[in-house]
Amino acid sequence: MVSAKIDIPQDTFLVGIGSSPGIAIGESFLLHRNRTTVVPRQITPEEVPGEVASFRRALKMSQVQLREVKDGVSDQRLVDHLYIIDTHLMILDDEMLVKDTISLIEKELLNAEAALQKTVRKFRDVFSSLEDEYLRDRQSDIDSVGDRILCNLTGETRQSLTDIDQKVVVIAHDLSPADTLQIDRKKIIGFVTDVGGRTSHTSILARSLGVPAVVGLETATALVPGGIPVIMDGTNGTLILNPSEMTFREYLRKKQDYEYQEQELLSYKELPAITRDGFRVSLQSNIELPMEISQALSQGTEGVGLMRSEFLFMGRPTPPDEEEQYHAYLEVVERMTPHPVTIRTLDVGGDKFVPEINLNDEMNPAMGLRGIRFSLNEKQMLNVQLRAILRASAQGPVRIMFPMLTGVAELRQCLEYLNAIKNELRTAGIKFDEKIPVGIMIETPAAALIADHLASEVDFFSIGTNDLIQYCLAVDRANEHVAYLYEPLHPAVLKALALICQAAEKNNIPVSMCGEMAGDPLYTLILLGLGINELSMNPSGLPRVKRILRQVDRSAGQKVIDEIFGLTTAQEVIQCLEKRMADLFPDLFGEPSF
């Protein structure tokens, strides 16, 4: 560790992304891991076999290392997450990764390191361009696997977390899921990284381990020396260097309060999410892979409110066939029964996912051929997906959900197509749920404005708040110049939510929410007051939202709605809401933010 001789002012605050809640107070440990520098080199045809052999050896070594990490996990909290290592092993076996790299070595006569880097960069660009934060964060898995292979190619050895023998807060450029699985909680009390997102696998593992984490701090390794006192708050994403005595005492108290609350939340896990006056809310989980079911069930989920199907289509030369999709859906349905599973049809632009479909680059992909527009343009692909979903519905409660709709005509086209697939299955004598509920995601202003028309033709609504907010406010939250305008409590967003809920109530259909607002306890009273009766979120958020619901009457939510709907700015709404939540839940919201 580097001793801190740098003069850092007391209470220097740095802000990143809070990715795993909790407070850690201790000494910083700077993990030195410079990225491997790759120098592209032209090779001779005679060198090709040697470079290919080196690449294959590095792949093999990487597989052995990951299997050793997997075999070394004994913590029961992490066993359910070993699928992440399996995912990395799958990436190592990925046909495109291997073939493309070898092809670059053979055809462009590139050295193995440069060929690998070029292939990984191509994969990374696909993920980094995605709108969906969860899917976008999968790029970190590609990076982790690429870095591992590269290290094995160059023979480089890296400092390991297992070498740390004292109680510290680790400061690193990045940590891989394999690193996180090796964290010893007695020594590593928290970590901060330059890169990363809330939904990266590293962050998911940190939450499961209960290790506070702040990611995406960008300059942490450049600004924080090893060996200085730090406080990190994984809830709000802050890192405080050289805390003063007053700050230290304040955060020590916050840490004790937080740990008490976490213990209390465990008692809510098995209880229903029902208000004191009997309003029942179904709390469900957003998942991507069948392996995530165990964690969702362990947090008391009552179903899958959003199963993303995109991962089945990624990183492969051709789309998955009906059998592959059927078995993936079936596994989730069988493990979740008797609770429902809502499967969203493919929600991406095909040019990013399926190389065999060549589409020209779009000037504005967020408003282009994506979501249901893409599926209706590629009907054979939609046909296969609907057949697989319908077949899985014969084995347990399933709901079909179409994304990115903007009008009734588009919806009717989907329903007409679905009915045609049903007829095909009937004719073939293949079983499916004849009464399978069909719903749509409401995530465009157009759909919100005509929600009354749409509600009469579907069985349920699901509000995708991430896109709805972006489209409603015409703001790209990933754009640093306008991200501040991404305001979930903007009066226009609240009015859109009210329109959707009123239409659902009038037509007697359930309304769900599966965007980020659903999992943030600050918004729970608003959603309760609007009458939303299904909330789907990251499984780790379920107990906290449930606690709030069980401690209030529905009238508390209606009162908040009455208070905020007369306000004219998002800031006014936030102030009003925070005050109301602090009054009702002083232990959760009563502390002013530092």
Image (cartoon, helix red, strand yellow):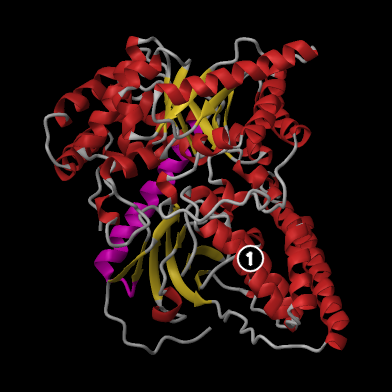
Q: Which residue is mark 1?
A: 144
The residue depicted at 30 percent of the width and 55 percent of the height is 483
Please rate how many residues cluster around mark 1, counting C-alpha atoms within 10 Å: few if below 14, some from 14 to 19, many from 20: some
The residue depicted at 68 percent of the width and 37 percent of the height is 290
Q: Which residues are magenta?
A: 241-267
Whole-percent x and y of residue 231?
Answer: 38, 66
Residue 311, picture quadrant: top right
Q: Secondary structure at mark 1?
A: helix
Residue 333, picture quadrant: top right
Image side of residue 309 versus residue 113, left or right: left
Between 107 and 301, the one lying in front of the other is 107
- Tell me if residue 37 comes above or below residue 301 in the rendering: below
Quarter of the figure that contains the C terminus: bottom left
Whole-percent x and y of residue 21?
Answer: 44, 51
In the image, is residue 249 part of the stretch drawn in magenta?
A: yes
The residue depicted at 53 percent of the width and 54 percent of the height is 360
**Does residue 210 show up?**
no
In the image, is residue 260 part of the stretch drawn in magenta?
A: yes
Between 397 and 264, the one lying in front of the other is 397
- Tell me if residue 3 comes above or below residue 334 in the rendering: below
Magenta: main secondary structure equals helix
- Tell me if residue 482 comes above or below residue 102 in the rendering: above
| Residue kind at label 1, given as amino acid type | Ser
